[in-house]
Each structure stands twice: as C-alpha cells, then as structure tokens.
Image (spheres, rainbow, N blue to C red):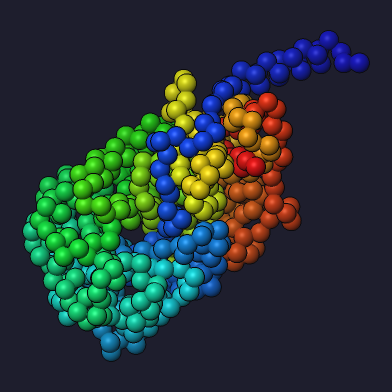
C-alpha cells in the first residue's frame, strides 16, 4: 500500500502531466472535399549545388537517395543547379572533375567559379533510379552560348534523354545585372539551340523550367516575378514545362539561435503560411499559363545557424509541415537543396563539409521518408481546419484519387520541446472522427527522445537518434541505406470505435495514421 506521501507525489505528477496534455477532436471528411489537391508522385525532391555534384558521386549518397526514391511511385528528381551553376566553365582538357579558379571561399561557396572537366559529368551517370534537372548557365559574368551548350550537351549525354526531367533556365535572374527582357531573350536563344541540337519536337520540346527566382525576388536588383517573365514571352514557343522559385524559411541571421527562435520561425505553422503566401500569389499570376509551379531550391535557414537549429530534428518538424502545407496549396514539387557546407543539408556526402568534416546523415533527414510515405500514389490532399487555431498543431488528410476515400492523416505537433530544457514533455490527445468506413488504423511516428536539437546518430550518438517508424539513417551504421534500431518497423495498431480513432502525439513529434 502506498504511503500518504507517495500518493501525494503520484497525484502531483498526474496533475502535472494532465496540465501538459491538450485534447482535440478533429473531423476528417470520409470522402475527399472539393478543396483537395492532387499531389504529384514525384513531389519530394533533392538538389545538389552544381559545382559540388562530384562530392555526391559516391555510394553513400546513392544509398541515401535510393532510400527515399524507393518509396516513391515515380523517379525522384534531383536538381543540379544553384548560384554556382551560372558560373561554371566547361574545360574539356581539365584532368580533375573540378577546379576552383575564383570566388570568396574557394572551393566551398556557391559563389565560387569552377572549371569543369569531363570527369565532372560522371556524376550525372550516378543515381540511375532518379531523374535530374540540368541548369543552363545563363548569368551575366561567364555567359557564352558555347559554354552553356557544352554544359547541357555533356550532361544530356551522361544522363540519357529519359532521365532529363527538365532544363532550368539560369538561377535567380533577379540578381543579374540586366532585367527581365534580357533574361527572356537569352532563355529563348538557349531553348532554340537545345531543341535544334537534340531534335526535340512536340511534347519532347516542352522541357524547360523558367524563373528560378530567389526567395523574395521582387525585392532584389530588379522587380522580377514570374508574371513579368511570362508577359515578356518566355513561353511564346510553348517550351516551358514548369516555373520555379526558391524558398528559405529563415533568410537572415537571427540574434539568437535558441528554442524561442525555433518556435517562432521554423516550428511555427503561422510563420510557414506567412512565408508561403507570396508563392500562392505567384501561382495565381501564372494560372492562365497552365504551367506547374515548383519550389526548386528550399532550405530551413540560409546561412548562419548551427546544425542543431537548421539541420536537427526541429528542422525535420519544419520540413514535414512546410512540405504538406505546400502540397495542399497546389505547389507541385519541393526540392531540398544540399551542399557540403550547408548546415541545413539532409546529409553531408564526404569529408569536405567544414562543420562536420566527415560524411554524416543529419537530424532533419527522417522528414524525407515521412513525406514520401505520406504522398504515396494517386493521392489528393487537404489541410484540415482546426478549432482553436493551428499555429503549433496541424493536420492533413490524403485521399485516394480513384475512390475519394481517406487513406491517411498526418498529425504534426509543432510545440517545441527539447531535453535540455528539463521541462516536462507535453502531448496532444487527438480524437479523429473518420466515419464508419474506416475499419482499422496503424500509427507510425517520426520521433526523437532528445527533442528538437537532436542531430542524429552520426553527429550525436545514440542519445540523439532520430527515426521514422523505428528506422534511422546513418553513415556509420548503414552507409545511408537505413536500418531499424529494434530490428523491425515500429508501428501501433489503434482501435476504431464508432468511427473514432484516438492518437497521442507528444510535443515535437509527427505521426501518420494509415487507414484501412
């Protein structure tokens, strides 16, 4: 029998736990509402900064890409591009793959100028199960048609036409010394040369990606939006396959990279929606063009932040919510940019990363398989409105396009928690009203016991493990292939009672509830 003191301690603990648990009831329409948006099966994407493609030309990166691509019903698309993609110079006599010849921090920066030898293009032969987007160099410093066509030609030959997802027309032209019309003129010249050299006709000639405009492009050198680009005639020959802009959740250095900043910027649905709003306007501006809109360069933080902020588990929580919010608004692809120097990268491919100095998978990575599994095949998504607001908790439902029945629901608890705070970890108890058509439910979790600052096994050891459905990805243990920590997938069977499913979602955790 418990003593009075023990009973009082237990009671106090129960009261404290209850105070940190909130309850929500969420109605999930059993059939897809009219607002549900079809999601492309190749929605999730990675991108490599152009000059650093050779760094990713290894088995480790191949394994990482395949571990996500194997979950997708269409080939994963890798974007090869970036600021450095407008600065590269093809040198057929260069013995090495690359040679940095100028720039602010040779050979680490995206603003460095590289010569590329024939061995560089071997990187396009890697990732055989993926497709790639090639960037046509079109900037204002090193631009010549001869160099641009040499780059495209070598990349095209290494890939093979079937693996060319698109040819992107430059990168962030709003930073060029000239305006919209000169950009469009150069783009049209490149399009003409490409279609002629490779004898592209009909649908095959519709292979170009326009824009690639920077985050907040209207505030840079020139007022430069997609509407301006299309009004200036970039699609007059019908060659544009997609239109692209870039997105960074935090684009400036903050006064502190702490839990308060994390909660107010990256782990905050309201802040994500505020940042997505201009892109919704961009989509509206080109709606009459019937051209898919993609975010072709995306990251949590653009420079300055430590890995535990921009590349840790808090960033994984951001990535899941940002991707699902984007797809629910009709964005057709999100490309997560990678570079050895980038703290926000999902993985570092080799020893050249100045922060890690070795190949690693970072804490943000489990977001990738989570998103790929949520997208699945033939789905259409809707964000579920929540009573009481959704700043720190969101819900998304995915429906089967053929049957219009609900397949799965993602629940994302963005309330920031970290072990270092010593605070009790709260939780949300969610009752899903899913209707009588649902007979069973399985829950899989993206989680970390350490919380938002966890950087993953490679950088932090077992105490900083980050997993999706019990699986984690490391360089040290599985060389990027992924392994189940307990030897098997971790999932929970949840009872369905009278069309209701109850799910517990701790703070700083995301789940997918799969229905049958």
Quarter where residue 440 is shown: top right
Q: Quadrant of the N terminus?
A: top right
Query: In this view of the protein, which residue sits in the foreground, 10 or 485?
Result: 485
Please give the name of the residue rendered at 62% of the width and 54% of the height, measured from the top-left corner.
472
Quarter where residue 110 is shown: bottom left
Query: Residue furthest toward the bottom?
Result: 93
Q: Position of residue 268 (x, y in %)?
A: 42, 33
Q: In the rendered view, would you say 168 is above or below 31?
A: below
Please give the name of the residue rendered at 53% of the width and 44% of the height, measured from the top-left corner.
403
Query: Residue furthest toward the right?
Result: 1
Q: Position of residue 40 (x, y in %)?
A: 42, 53
Q: In the rendered view, would you say 165 is above or below 329?
A: below
Query: In this view of the protein, which residue sits in the foreground, 13 or 292?
Result: 292
Left or right: 162, with 83 as reference point: right
Please give the name of the residue rendered at 46% of the width and 42% of the height, measured from the top-left corner.
381
Query: Residue furthest toward the front?
Result: 403
Q: Quadrant of the C terminus?
A: top right
Please give the name of the residue rendered at 65% of the width and 19% of the height, measured from the top-left corner.
18
Residue 372 visible in the shown view: no
Residue 21 visible in the shown view: yes
């Amino acid at each position: 029998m418990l003593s009075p003191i023990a009973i009082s301690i237990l009671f106090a603990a129960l009261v404290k736990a209850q105070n940190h648990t909130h309850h929500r009831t969420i109605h999930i329409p059993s059939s897809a509402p009219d607002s549900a948006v079809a999601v492309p099966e190749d929605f999730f994407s990675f991108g490599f900064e152009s000059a650093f493609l050779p760094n990713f030309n290894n088995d480790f990166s191949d394994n990482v890409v395949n571990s996500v691509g194997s979950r997708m019903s269409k080939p994963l698309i890798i974007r090869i591009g970036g600021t450095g993609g407008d600065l590269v110079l093809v040198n057929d006599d260069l013995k090495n793959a690359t040679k940095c010849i100028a720039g602010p921090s040779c050979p680490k920066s995206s603003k460095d100028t590289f010569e590329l030898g024939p061995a560089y293009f071997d990187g396009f032969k890697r990732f055989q199960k993926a497709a790639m987007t090639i960037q046509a160099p079109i900037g204002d410093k090193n631009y010549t048609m001869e160099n641009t066509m040499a780059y495209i030609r070598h990349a095209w030959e290494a890939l093979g036409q079937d693996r060319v997802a698109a040819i992107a027309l430059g990168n962030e032209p709003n930073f060029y010394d000239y305006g919209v019309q000169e950009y469009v003129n150069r783009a049209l010249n490149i399009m003409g040369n490409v279609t002629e050299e490779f004898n592209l006709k009909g649908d095959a000639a519709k292979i170009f990606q326009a824009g690639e405009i920077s985050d907040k492009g209207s505030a840079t050198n020139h007022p430069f939006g997609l509407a301006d680009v299309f009004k200036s005639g970039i699609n007059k020959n019908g060659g544009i396959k997609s239109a692209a802009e870039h997105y960074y959740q935090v684009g400036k250095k903050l006064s502190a990279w702490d839990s308060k900043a994390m909660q107010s910027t990256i782990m905050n649905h309201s802040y994500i929606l505020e940042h997505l709003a201009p892109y919704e306007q961009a989509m509206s501006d080109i709606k009459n063009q019937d051209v898919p809109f993609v975010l072709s360069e995306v990251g949590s933080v653009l420079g300055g932040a430590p890995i535990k902020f921009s590349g840790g588990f808090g960033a994984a929580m951001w990535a899941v919510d940002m991707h699902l919010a984007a797809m629910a608004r009709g964005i057709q692809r999100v490309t997560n940019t990678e570079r050895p120097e980038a703290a926000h990268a999902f993985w570092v491919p080799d020893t050249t990363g100045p922060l890690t100095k070795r190949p690693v998978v970072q804490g943000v990575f489990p977001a990738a398989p989570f998103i790929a599994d949520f997208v699945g095949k033939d789905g259409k998504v809707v964000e579920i409105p929540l009573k009481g607001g959704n700043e720190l908790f969101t819900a998304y439902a995915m429906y089967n396009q053929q049957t219009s029945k609900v397949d799965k629901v993602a629940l994302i608890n963005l309330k920031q928690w970290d072990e270092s705070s010593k605070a009790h970890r709260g939780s949300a108890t969610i009752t899903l009203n899913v209707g009588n058509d649902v007979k069973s439910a399985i829950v899989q979790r993206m989680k970390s016991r350490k919380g938002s600052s966890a950087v993953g096994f490679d950088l932090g050891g077992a105490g900083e493990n980050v997993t999706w459905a019990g699986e984690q990805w490391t360089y040290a243990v599985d060389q990027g292939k992924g392994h189940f920590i307990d030897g098997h997938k971790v999932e929970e069977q949840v009872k369905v009672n009278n069309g209701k499913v109850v799910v517990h979602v701790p703070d700083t955790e995301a789940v997918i509830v799969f229905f049958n």
